[in-house]
Amino acid sequence: MIEELAEHEAAAVAAIDRADSLDALASAKTEALGKNAPLTSAQRNLGSLPPEKRKDAGKALNEVRRRVEARLEAKTADLAESERAARLVAERLDLTEVPVEVEVGHAHVVTQAWEELEDVFVGMGFRVAEGPEVETDWHNFDALNIPPRHPARDAFDTIYVNHGEPGSTLLRTHTSPVQIRAMLDQEPPIYVVAPGRVFRRDTADATHMPVFHQIEGLVVDRGISLADLAGTIEAFTESYFGPGFTSRLRPNYFPFTEPSAEFDIQLPDGSWLELGGSGMVHPNVLRAGGIDPEEWTGFAFGFGIDRLAAMKFRIDDLRDMFTEDLRFLSQF
Ligand code: DAH
């Protein structure tokens, strides 16, 4: 019986050692210690041994079982560890950051100036308004007190569009028609700025582009005077350009304002920059916008965004701003 036990133990250990996975080990366990295992039948047979042999055989059998179980346990731990390690390798994700050269773009110089201007005026209580780029002759001229054959029309090299009556539709030559749209859209008080793209039949040169950008301002309220216009231009100048910059108004003529003034900005070095036009909204313009000039008064102003951006970034040829040359544009 004792010799047989040694053989059974050796067979059980061999089966355990052979197992190369936890599944295989489960079969080895059945083979070594299961219902039909030799060690189990030996245990069942203990009862048929003579009493004097039974005790030693029982003890020996218990020791064998304990050793086989210990071997099994050690092998289980071994296999579990190597299977875990294998799984980790298989499921490994490489999360190392790979440095990639990405070139991040930014807004165009004109867009930057446009957005800064909006911010400054919104900060002063203005709302941003919009109008179409393809405009009616009426909004662009008539409603702004420039009737057909008025000499002021010659100052605008207008691009007409082949739509409707000849001469009735055009690419807006300035942002001023948005004044009319704002008045027709809402009751006074009105405080709006309208930045946008405008078009003229012009040949591009260092200071002119056939497509350029303007920002228009319109205020209509009770008791608005020229002092409000001057104060607004001055507040804008300080806010946009910074301390040390001031503004002045110079008498001028525009059909849509009376009186009219050109406004200039004085730089800290004392030099003057002509920025745009302004004035008190002409009564005919208020009427075209459906507003009673006896009850309401207003002022308006308008200036070019491109020249402003060019000045700010010291760009001396407007055409350079509208190339697609990133080597140039990425500087600003
Ligand atoms: N629309 C004018 C232009 O393009 C600029 C201008 C002048 C706008 C006087 C105004 C204004 O609102 O009051 O030359």
Image (tube, rainbow, N blue to C red):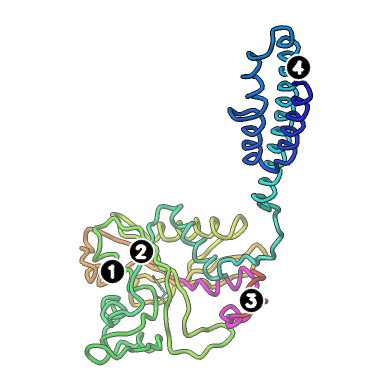
Residue 305 lies within the magenta run: yes
Alpha-carbon span between mark 3 and mark 4: 90 Å
Residue identified by numbered label 1:
181
Alpha-carbon span between mark 1 and mark 3: 37 Å
State which mark lies toward you, 4 or 1.
4
Amino acid type, label 1: Arg
Helix, strand or loop status at disc 4: helix
Helix, strand or loop status at disc 3: helix
Amino acid type, label 3: Leu
The image quarter containing residue 64 is: top right
Amino acid type, label 4: Ala
State which mark lies toward you, 2 or 3.
3
Amino acid type, label 2: Ala
- First in sequence: mark 3 or mark 4? 4
Are the residues at dot 2 and dot 1 in contact (C-beta closer than 8 Å)? yes
Image x and y of residue 138, in percent: 26, 80
Image x and y of residue 100, in percent: 69, 63
Residue identified by numbered label 2:
129
Image x and y of residue 275, in percent: 51, 71
- Residue drawn at x 43%, y 55% is 122
Alpha-carbon span between mark 2 and mark 3: 31 Å
Residue identified by numbered label 4:
60
